[in-house]
Image (cartoon, grey):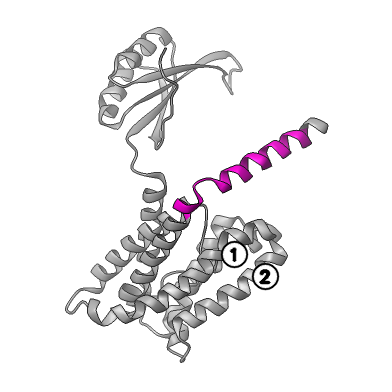
């Protein structure tokens, strides 16, 4: 028990130190991300009535009933921050505090730009795609900082904490309800574009946060261990690590080879492994970041 507490305190200390690193850069990226999302919200979504995500999506509906979007977002975010403080605690609330206040102000600041950025005779599909891509880039920059803009994300975290619903499922349900609320002010066609925007934002956010994979990781189990190891080491920029493992079905001791190769060499490595051992078992996946010790 003592060692568990000691380990927990060490982990908390590491997380606390990580939170304090690169604060100026992180706040700059947060502000830049909020600006990009606010601009795309006004230019692509609000202007064309595409209700697509979170509190800002609800604000498009609210504006049709006479409530300014930025004011709706600000009030809603403030209420959710208070709720977050009493249900999730200060640490969770702190990460959403600045973004929750900056975002509605930037929505108000970028709104006057709309008349200069009106796209005549452009298909709504193109508007949805460009808006989704731009918003995804903005959210990616925000999430890279470990901050967020609050809103319905806070509600989802509360639901996940006090129910058996996972955070991911709660967010999809929440965003789905927001998009469907667009039926109050738009047609089914526009609502479907809202779902398309959700997918594009999710995809682009992952690309910005994780980056584009430049390496592939191979997890390999084979009888020809030495040949496979030599083959992987012969690949330019390749690397391989041997891990002691045990088969889940046979319970037999095995060696798991972990190899990392450039994405451009994925095909040749895959075919080479099959050639070396027709009965080989391997799993290939994207490696977004590879950190290695310098060779001595």
> Does residue 46 lie above or below 37 as drawn?
below
Of residues 215 and 114, the one drawn nearer to the viewer in this rendering: 114
Q: Which residue is mark 2?
A: 83
Main SS category, magenta section: helix
In the image, what residue occupies the spot 61% across and 60% down?
94
Q: Which residues are magenta?
A: 4-26
In the image, what residue occupies the spot 57% across and 48% down?
19
Q: Which residue is mark 1?
A: 154
Of residues 99 and 76, the one drawn nearer to the viewer in this rendering: 99
The 10 Å Cα crowd at callout 2, few under 14, some 14 to 19, many 20 or more, is some
User: Pointers 2 and 1 in contact (CB under 8 A)?
Assistant: yes
Quadrant assignment, res 216:
top left
Any magenta on residue 256?
Answer: no
Q: Secondary structure at mark 1?
A: helix
The single residue placed furthest to the top in the displayed view is 226
Of residues 245 and 73, the one drawn nearer to the viewer in this rendering: 73
Of residues 162 and 103, the one drawn nearer to the viewer in this rendering: 103
The single residue placed furthest to the right in the displayed view is 1
Left of 26 or right of it: where is 49? left
Any magenta on residue 21?
Answer: yes
């Amino acid at each position: 028990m003592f060692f568990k507490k000691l380990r927990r305190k060490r982990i908390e200390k590491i997380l606390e130190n990580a939170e304090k690193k690169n604060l100026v850069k992180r706040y700059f990226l947060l502000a830049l991300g909020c600006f990009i999302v606010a601009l795309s919200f006004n230019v692509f979504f609000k202007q064309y009535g595409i209700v697509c995500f979170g509190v800002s999506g609800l604000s498009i509906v609210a504006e049709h009933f006479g409530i300014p979007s930025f004011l709706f977002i600000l009030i809603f975010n403030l209420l959710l921050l208070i709720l977050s403080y009493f249900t999730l605690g200060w640490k969770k609330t702190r990460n959403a505090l600045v973004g929750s206040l900056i975002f509605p102000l930037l929505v108000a600041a970028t709104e006057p730009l709309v008349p200069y950025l009106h796209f005549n005779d452009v298909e709504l599909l193109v508007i949805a795609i460009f808006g989704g891509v731009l918003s995804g880039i903005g959210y990616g920059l925000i999430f890279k900082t470990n901050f967020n803009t609050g809103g319905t994300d806070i509600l989802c975290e509360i639901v996940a904490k006090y129910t058996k619903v996972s955070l991911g499922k709660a967010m999809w349900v929440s965003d789905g309800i927001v998009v469907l609320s667009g039926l109050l002010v738009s047609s089914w066609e526009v609502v479907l574009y809202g779902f398309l925007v959700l997918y594009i934002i999710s995809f682009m956010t992952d690309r910005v946060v994780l980056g584009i994979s430049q390496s592939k990781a191979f997890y390999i189990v084979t009888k020809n261990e030495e040949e496979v190891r030599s083959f992987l080491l012969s690949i330019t920029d390749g690397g391989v690590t041997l891990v002691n493992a045990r088969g889940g079905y046979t319970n037999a001791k095995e060696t798991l080879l972990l190899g990392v190769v450039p994405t451009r060499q994925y095909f040749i490595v895959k075919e080479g492994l099959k050639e070396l051992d027709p009965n080989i078992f391997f799993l290939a996946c994207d490696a977004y970041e590879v950190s290695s010790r310098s060779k001595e």
